[in-house]
Amino acid sequence: MEEPKFTQEEIEEGRSAAILAYIPFMCFVPLLKWKDNRYAHSHARQGLALFVIELIALILLIPGLAVLIVKAALTVAIVLALIGIAFVLQDKEWKIPYLGEWIDRKVDERFRKEEEHFS
């Protein structure tokens, strides 16, 4: 049986901060003030991720800016794809800066979890 991730004391002490974490802009309060409570801090990190998504959505509501962001993202994706093709044609390995390492870590984690599950 799996051990609980958080103690009951952490949950009770961090409950209000954890709730606060999901309110836009307020996620910074538990991130900065509740660092010692793993329960509150865990929810604060998720709240921060949602806050970033909300900000992106708000930015994309601005018509001219949204088109510019989409065009820039597509341009970067096309350039990175062309670089990747060039490396493949040279029989070399290439990782997209930042993203390549992150993908490798996530894939490794996934395979480790599957191996543990089947062992």
Image (spheres, rainbow, N blue to C red):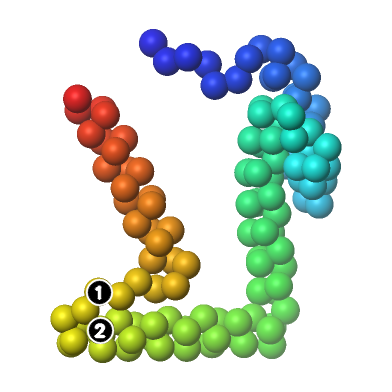
Number of marks in the rendered image: 2
Q: Are marks 1 and 2 in contact (CB under 8 Å)?
A: yes
Q: CA distance from mark 1 to mark 2?
A: 7 Å
In the drawing, what numbered circle is on residue 105? none
Residue 101's spot in the image, x, y percent?
Answer: 40, 61
Residue, x 26% and y 29% (percent of image)?
Answer: 116
- Residue 63 at x, y percent in the picture: 69, 83
Q: Which residue type carries mark 2?
A: Phe
Amino acid identity at mark 1: Glu
Q: Is residue 70 above or below residue 108?
A: below
> Which residue is depicted at the point 32% across and 43% down?
110
Q: Which residue is mark 1?
A: 93
Residue 69: x percent and y percent? 60, 82
For the C terminus, the quadrant is: top left
Residue 1 position by quadrant: top left
Q: Disc 1 or 2, which lies upstream in sequence? A: 2
- Which secondary structure lies at badge 1? loop
The crowding category of the residue bearing disc 1, from other C-alpha atoms within 10 Å (few below 14, some 14 to 19, many at least 20), is: few
Residue 71 visible: yes
Which secondary structure lies at badge 2? helix
Q: Is residue 68 left or right of residue 77?
A: right
Q: Which mark is residue 87?
A: 2
Q: Does any portion of residue 20 appear in the rendered image?
A: no
Residue at the location (66% across, 67% down)? 56
